[in-house]
Amino acid sequence: MADTLAMGDHGSAGHGPKDKSKRDFLVMLPVAGAVIGAGAIAWPLIDSMNPSGDVLALASTEVDLTPIAEGSGITVVWRGKPIFVRYRTPKEIKEAEDVKLSQLIEPQPDSARVKPGHAQWIVLIGICTHLGCIPLGNKPTDPRGEWGGWYCPCHGSQYDTSGRVRHGPAPLNLWIPPYQFLNNSRIKIG
Amino acid sequence: MAAGLFKSELKNPVLRWVDTRLPVITLMQKEYGTFPTPRNFNYFWNFGALATVTLLIMIATGVFLAMHYTPNSTMAFASVQHIMRDVNYGWLIRYVHMNGASMFFIVVYIHIYRGLYYGSYKFPRELLWMLGVVILLLMMATAFMGYVLPWGQMSFWGATVITNLFSAIPVVGTTIVQWLWGGFSVGNPTLNRFFSLHYLLPFVIVGVVFLHVVALHITGSNNPLGIDVKGPQDTLPFHPYYTVKDSVGLCVFLAIWAAFVFFMPNLLGDVINNIPANPLHTPADVVPEWYFLPFYAILRSVPNKFMGVMLMFASIGVLFVLPWLDTSPVRSCRFRPIYRILVPLLVVDVFVLGYVGAHHPQGFIILLGRVATAWYFLHFLVFTPLVGLFETPLPLPESIAAPVVRKSPSGGGPIPGGAVAKPMENA
């Protein structure tokens, strides 16, 4: 700051400390303004990377349940993700309901994972909660693991007939998408 | 201090550790902090900083637009509509980018006018000036290719007309044009390469801007008096004096830009470009964006195709040799009684050319276009060398500080701290 010459000295030497705090305030004010302004400019750019209107508009999928045979499931696509819709047998339902919650990795009763009166239908997001692979088990011929639900081929996670994780490395149960029954043979996901 | 380390004077140990190995902090302090800058800048000296900020905003908005745009001739138009309707704030980002092109040219044209009026192109700043002309050419190429991307009617036919300029080259013209197109007409391959180059060239501009700034910091800035800095009494440190002055101009500039974006986003655009490109139908009026109109007028003012194209390129090319066309040793027009009239007249002439470029070439418009074109070249090739030889310049002040000191009430002596700001504006 050698070139500030006389002026630089005047600023500090000629006035008291009271003046200095005034000057600090005058510096902080525009800096704060510039930071807020930069944030206001940055936010639209950042937000533009979020899902756009047309992507959000594809947020719901309707599924006809009539072609699904008892004991097997189908995979439908909702928001680019696989959704398992499985028609459970009475034996599978009983197994799911009778498990002691203390045995579960993420304790959750089966009744919290199905719609009341529709216990034969389980609807799950078909993505392993470990690292995002799609577990096997919709077809009766698929490997379903020890608990008869789903088996993830990537790292061996196993889920029961309620989609709850029974054997790691997955930490959580399969997620349930938001859905509702339009009538007894038709659901709307999303 | 170990061998090979830079002797940093920073106090903070972390910053100092970095600075001794990579002295960027010291460099920034030297070039943008204490950098000695003539004390008598007026607001014309804001426009270099404004252009830099505009370039950065254009790159930032452009990068985000490219995340949503599809450079395919069947999908490009729809993807722009997707940006405008579906993408969060897509309309805002696109309008900032679209109007930003116009803002960029306004700023750069004023920046060039500043150089012309105050003789910033003269010794020792010839190369600095020529790098500026390179930036202008790169900007024109970038803006043109960017305008093609929305793939509307004006995009398509603008691309057709401008690429066809190269067909004026004898013998190899057609071959070159087909090479530019990647086909036998403007089509998908053309759109793809224009997108690629439109993304690339701004970064080339950043590189040339860097050289422009390096050259500037070697010669130092010119100033409204056009005389050399004689010593520390003629300069102020860049920070805080000119960072603050540039910030004031930046606020005004961004407010104007925002006014366009929020209140008249389509004023500078052409409605025809809201019709998807149709290779079988040319719109009734094919006009370039406003910032190209003067050059378009020069092109059309010559009845010969080859000569028209040559003259258009020469209108920029003449700027390259301006440092050697101007024979006057005096930089600032403030001390050149004749040339200070000629430079604003050139601005009027360019506005006339712009008017001509926006209208159908018939009757009076043709004549006006030819006179204005002739004046443009006469200004650079005849008036500039001759006026320099015959004009008697006004006496130059002995130094930048001299008129300031003389005006100050204490008459001579050391400059009183409080009085510094005001004379700086007037000098």
Image (cartoon, rainbow, N blue to C red):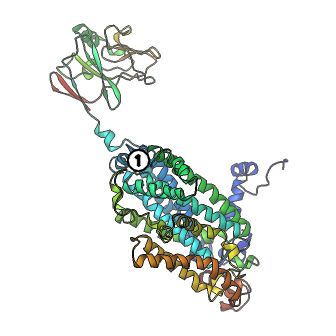
The foreground one among B147 and B86 is B147
Q: On the picture, is B115 further left or further right than B161?
A: right
Q: Position of residue B353 (x, y in %)?
A: 48, 74
The chain under label 1 reads A
Task: Report the amino acid beneath label 1.
Answer: Asp
* Residue located beneath label 1 in the image: A47
Q: Position of residue B211 (x, y in %)?
A: 67, 59
Based on the displayed image, in which of its 4 quarters is residue A27 positioned? bottom right
Q: On the picture, is B90 further left or further right than B39?
A: left
Task: Using the rendered image of the protein, determine whether residue A29 is visible from the camera's viewpoint.
Answer: no
Q: Residue at x 19, y 22 (%)?
A: A116
Q: Residue at x 54, y 78 (%)?
A: B374
Task: Using the rendered image of the protein, determine whether residue B150 is visible from the camera's viewpoint.
Answer: yes
Q: On the picture, is B375 further left or further right than A122?
A: right
Label 1 crowding class (10 Å Cα cut-off): few <14, some 14-19, many 20+?
A: some
Q: Residue at x 51, y 59 (%)?
A: B165
The foreground one among B125 and A141 is B125
